[in-house]
Amino acid sequence: MIKTLHIFFIFFILIFPLKADDINSIIINGNKRISDETIKIYGEIDKINKYSEKNSNRILKNLYETGFFENVEVKYEKDILVINLKEYPIINQLVIIGEKSKKFKDEIIKIINSKQKKSLNKSNIAKDVDIIKNLYSSLGYNFAKVETKLKKINENNYDLLFEIDRGEKTKISKINFIGNNNVRNTRLKNIIASEEDKFWKVISKNTVLSKNLINFDLRLLTNYYKSIGFYDVKINSNLAEIINSEQAELIYSIDEGNRFTIEKISTNVDEVFDKNIFFQLNKTYKELAGQYYSPFKIKEVLDEIDEIVISNNLQFVEHNVQEEVKDDTINIIFNIFEGEKKLIERINIKGNTVTNEDVIRGEIISDEGDPFILVGLEKSISKLKSRNIFKDVKYEIIDGSDSNLKIVDIIVEERPTGEISAGAGVGTSGGALSIGIKENNWLGTGKAVEFKMDLDEESLSGILSFSDPNYNYLGNSINYFLKSESNDKPDQGYENTVVSAGVGTSFEQYKDLRVSLGTSFSYDDLRTLSSATDALKKNSGEFTELSVNYGLSHDKRDRTFMPTSGGVTSFSQTIPVYADKSFISNTFAHSSYKSLTENIVGAGKFYVSSINGLGSDDVRLSKRRSLSGKRLRGFEKGKIGPLDGTDHIGGNYSAALNFEANLPNILPENTNADIGAFLDFGNVWGVDYDSSVETSNKVRSSAGFTLNWMSPLGPMSFVLSQNISKADTDKTESFRFNLGTTF
């Protein structure tokens, strides 16, 4: 029997010999801190039962990727897999030398790959040097030096030292653009954030050559070009020609591409929704067809869709945009469809250390348990951002406890909310000074408190105001004010003191349409001067008045500051409730803006105001209308229109019409100044208390130039005007100078 088994065993070996690449055992050498079992797991060694070059390389790759080993060797000896290792030493301590700021040191330690009590990986150290240099470069230290040293503690422990020399910040000596065939350099310089270094910009951070700022500039330039129709614009390169360690010339290379127009716009609405709800979009589409393509115009349509969704209480609505490009035209399709049906499980507020949580929740459209509507959430975020109390507002959406639930985290970054301001203006008619202090987040309530005082040669006024932008979380604001004013107007024949107080509210009734309502009470002690005529002296006395007012404003400007298209129209009226003398006043104003060329923006403005006594009541002197120097340039404020003897007394009516346009290519690009031209028309007329008072229906007019200069002392403006038509009794002003700054 034994002989038979022996023969069978020999026969089995001959038929089924052992393969040379079988692994029967594994030997690991050189590991001191990391166990054999851990190494097998990291290297996925237990999954391998046969040796091959492929499997060997796999083990090497897996173990090197751990970052624990300086050297790894894999050998196969007969049926034994041998792995020889050399572990990296441990970083005992990270030391930053040469950087004084503890905050900045902490930031460096946070972002580098090397970590205390972790493996000392030479590859990571090399990467860390680049990370630190890039960090300093982003702040303008483009020639920062970073060196590394190792301090041996023992065989397996080292201190890792980073020696840093910031050097000097590199300032932008000049900014140039290449390839901008349709847009002037000056226009592009006004768009980007980077600025040329000038001696009066000592506090500006934007004069420093910074990678972060350059990347921001690229986004701004791209967005601008796309907003005026250059759909496929490419900012091919941004170059910085280094003059020396402290100066560099910044160069942007632009490939404008073709300019695209919108050919056709349509809407594709999911059958679950009533298409008629979105019918009003057709009017917008007709307005946009044929215009230059702009992503901002597309965003306006999406905002309009969102307004329709919210106003009609539609749930689970989503949308996207299709753009079909052909030659130099674009067809746009807005797809509106039903999204996932989700509910809000919880809303978490984070980051508010000063602001009360209910202030933030009061701006959020949805509540816990409501349908999760992304449109409503984004609108809420926009409302929070519009408040002047947050530097930034973000949101995160997290899966809830169930598949149909969502958790919303709203993260706010608060900003300093206190403001101190001062300003001064000087003109040929006199001087003016204003100072103010404001707190936009009083005691964390989101309410604003402000005190402001204005002083000139004829008047002194102070106003204390309080406002709640989201009163009772209803989406409308409420405002209170207390004002005291003292006037001495010898050229108008009177002096007076006015104390007034009021309360008002405003709210958005519809997109771009804002409604305001208010009431006010005033006491006016008016005294005519001894030189005044008898008729004028009849206006003297003490007067009290309780009135209500309302206003409408429709704003379609593309932006509030320096608009290039659209317009704003407003109307307001004040109606007496109780008064010693009753008046009703009306004001209408309209401004329209249009880009005449790529470099010229034209503006047309119309203003008219009236005040009339009710019954037999005459309009007293302090209430009568006049035109300011801004509405009718070339004339002194209050020094045109009806005369009582030699006193300008104002009128029942005032009106002005203005045309303005900036003039390109007049001044060198590096002057930080621009010139504009204007043509003004205006008049003040109408006297109700004495028909014998001299009045003139002659329209006054003037033309001239404006110069706006960002000077070392702050923004300056100059107005040079020439009267075209005037009355003999008018007091004119050919030159006006204003200097103003805020700090």
Image (cartoon, helix red, strand yellow):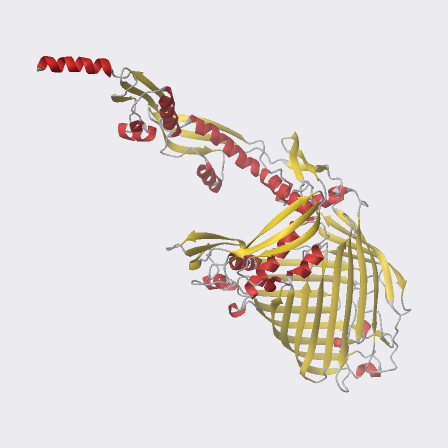
| Residue 309 appears in the rendering | yes
Q: Quadrant of residue 42?
A: top left
Residue 741 placement, left or right of 489: left
Using the image, determine if residue 653 lies above or below residue 302: below
Q: Quadrant of the N terminus?
A: top left
Using the image, determine if residue 649 lies above or below residue 379: below
| Residue name at image x 64 percent, y 60 percent | 281
Using the image, determine if residue 94 lies above or below residue 665: above
Q: Quadrant of the C terminus?
A: bottom right
Q: Position of residue 607 (x, y in %)?
A: 77, 67
Observer-nearest of 649 and 618: 618
Q: Position of residue 95 (x, y in %)?
A: 42, 33
Residue 49 placement, left or right of 440: left
Observer-nearest of 420 and 472: 472
From this viewpoint, which residue is outermost toward the right? 728
| Residue 416 appears in the rendering | no
Residue 246 placement, left or right of 21: right
Residue 54 placement, left or right of 626: left
Q: Quadrant of residue 83?
A: top left
| Residue name at image x 65 percent, y 30 percent | 244
Q: Position of residue 349 (x, y in %)?
A: 45, 57
Q: Position of residue 252 (x, y in %)?
A: 68, 37
Q: Quadrant of residue 526?
A: bottom right
